[in-house]
Image (cartoon, rainbow, N blue to C red):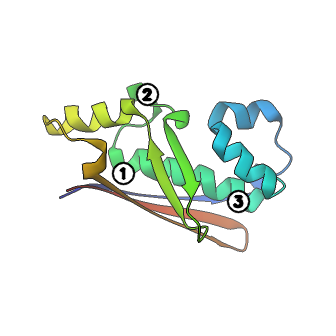
Amino acid sequence: MIIGIGTDIIRIKRFENKKQYFYDSIFTENEKIYFEKKLYNAQSVAGGFAAKEAFLKAIGSGIAENIGLLDIEILHNNKNAPYYNISQKIITYINNILNKNIEKENINLNLSISHDGEYACAFAIIEVL
């Protein structure tokens, strides 16, 4: 059952020349390591940020619901495809919405990130198996 779909589009230029405190407040250590390897390329950073925003829209919470950007982690598999890793806070939030007790392994999170010209976009689907 799909419980949410979200998308976000953002101007890549907004992520040029950011200070370290910006990265520390938005991205996990694993994400920052990935961006370091990419030399903090604005396109990669914008895509990561758009992915987090798309997830928040899909879950319908926004940051105000006690879920922060650090609760959503964007990792990459061995083919460099992005995927979500979520905190226990988000799992609890999903369970509260559905009034169920669903384990993390029964939550399917789909993510697509794309870049073109001056924009990066992301699309998220949250599904409960």
Q: What residue is rendered at 79% in x and 55% in y?
A: 37
Q: CA distance from mark 2 to mark 3?
A: 26 Å
Which quarter of the picture shows residue 10? bottom right
Q: What residue is rendered at 82% in x and 51% in y?
A: 16
Residue occupied by mark 2:
64
Residue occupied by mark 3:
44
Q: CA distance from mark 3 to mark 1?
A: 21 Å
Give above or below for 46 relative to 114. above
Q: Residues within 10 Å of mark 1 (few under 14, many from 20)?
A: many
Q: Quadrant of the C terminus?
A: bottom left
Q: Residue furthest top?
A: 66
Q: CA distance from mark 2 to mark 1?
A: 15 Å
Numbered-mark total:
3
Which quarter of the picture shows residue 88? top left
Q: Quadrant of the N terminus?
A: bottom left
Give above or below for 120 relative to 90. below
Q: What residue is rendered at 72% in x and 44% in y?
A: 32
Could you tell me the amino acid type at mark 3?
Ser
Which of these two is toward me, 128 or 43?
128
Query: For numbered disc 2, what is the local secondary structure?
Result: helix
Q: Residues within 10 Å of mark 3 (few under 14, many from 20)?
A: many
Q: Say whether disc 2 or disc 3 marks the residue closer to the N-terminus.
A: 3
Q: Residues within 10 Å of mark 2 (few under 14, many from 20)?
A: few
Could you tell me the amino acid type at mark 1?
Ala
Q: Residue furthest front?
A: 78
Q: Say whether disc 3 or disc 1 marks the residue closer to the N-terminus.
A: 3
Which of these two is toward me, 113 or 33?
33
